[in-house]
Amino acid sequence: MQRSWRDDGTGQAIRNVVAAYLAQRDRRGELAVPDPALAAHQFVMLLSAEGQVRSLRGLQPLTEEEIREIAHQTTDLIIRAHRPS
């Protein structure tokens, strides 16, 4: 399952969208993101790793609330990491 998600282009498409968003915020001076592609990769990996851990590698489905919490916490971390000085 994980391999098919990674290899079918979905993961790359998501990373591309996130990277474009981060690059746009960098250009506007709202964030300082020297490597948007790397930051997007880190964002997606943090989301998926936390989801896997909390769901016991998919054995225990996550609630909508848990999914929102993971998304919020991960987004907050990435945004704080790229605050402009």
Image: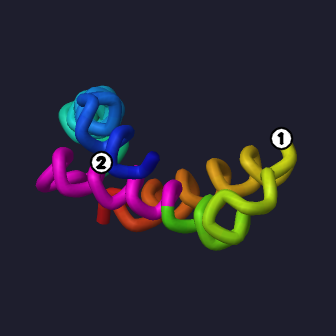
**Distance Cα–Cα, label 2 vs label 1:** 23 Å
The magenta stretch is: 32-48
Q: Residue at x 13, y 55 (%)?
A: 34
Q: Residue at x 19, y 56 (%)?
A: 38
**Along the horizontal axis of the image, is 34 left or right of 3?**
left
Q: Residue at x 75, y 54 (%)?
A: 69
Q: Nearer the viewer, residue 84 or 7?
A: 7
Picture coordinates of residue 5 (x, y %)? 38, 39
Amino acid under disc 1:
Glu
Q: Nearer the viewer, mark 2 or mark 1?
A: 1
Amino acid under disc 2:
Ala
Q: Are marks 2 and 1 in contact (CB under 8 Å)?
A: no
Give the secondary structure at mark 1: helix
6 relative to 73, above or below: above
Badge number at residue 64? 1
Residue at the spot of label 2 = 40
Picture coordinates of residue 7 (x, y %)? 24, 39
